[in-house]
Image (cartoon, rainbow, N blue to C red):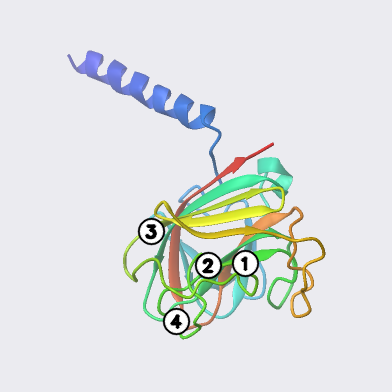
Amino acid sequence: MKKLLFTLALALACSISAADKSDGWISLFDGKSLAGWKANEVPDTFKVVDGELVVKGPRAHLFYVGEVQGAKFKNFELKLDIKTFPKANSGVYFHTEFQGPGWPAKGYEVQVNNTHGDPKKTAGLYNVKDNFEAPAKDGEWFTMHIKVEGKHVVTSVNGKVIVDYTEEENPPRKANPGRLIGSGTFALQGHDPGSEVHYKNIFVKPLP
């Protein structure tokens, strides 16, 4: 009986693994380390604790530099499980690139903020198409989904669409000239020492 149960469990595990691979989703975070990621400014802002990527500390950004797609994405779906704490601010960048100190100059930022003083809330495209109503609560895990196809960007939280945006031709970007659709990698933001945000289950699905 034990041998049979082991065989069934092994078969189930293999079938789940095969299903995960066949549906196109690829993990970017192993839940054990920051392998495939590179921090600028203050690396200690990012730690892995109990399978979660904990962001807490001075301003810094953690860029994906791993092997998937050569860390260069154009059309894709990205999904992450996120938990914010009171007055926390963070963000998820896409179409960006590694840089030293400062806020990333290239790419879009999808805001992560449910109760921080900044009125621009979770899942808005920061300074492009903002969202002013928090779609989730502090202390509770929520799933944020970002889909980019061509010039079209859709963000959602727990299945509810928050932003549906299409970048126009030569959009006005005086304050953020690099905030344009293109291609690049992802980055997670550590905003300030008073902010704590946890991430897990970070998956990408490259699209044609």
Q: Vertically, is 20 above or below 64? A: above
Amino acid type, mark 3: Phe
Contact between marks 3 and 4 (CB within 8 A): the answer is no
Label 4 element class: loop
Q: Which residue is mark 3?
A: 142
Amino acid type, mark 2: Phe
Answer with the quarter of the image where residue 168 lies: bottom right
What residue lies at 37% left-to-right and 74% top-to-bottom? 85
Q: Which residue is mark 1?
A: 109
What residue lies at 53% left-to-right and 67% top-to-bottom? 46
Q: Residues within 10 Å of mark 2 (few under 14, many from 20)?
A: many
Q: Residues within 10 Å of mark 3 (few under 14, many from 20)?
A: some
The answer for how far apart the CA atoms under marks 4 and 1 are is 16 Å
The answer for how far apart the CA atoms under marks 2 and 3 are is 20 Å
Number of marks present in the image shown: 4
Q: Which residue is mark 2?
A: 46
* Residue in the foreground of this view, choosing between 114 and 168: 168
Amino acid type, mark 4: His
Q: Which mark is residue 116?
A: 4
Q: Quadrant of the C terminus?
A: top right
Instruction: Mark 4 or mark 1: name the one nearer the start of the chain.
Output: 1
Q: Which mark is residue 42?
A: none
Instruction: Mark 2 or mark 4: name the one nearer the start of the chain.
Output: 2
Horizontal relation, residue 19 to residue 7: left or right: right
Q: Quadrant of the N terminus?
A: top left
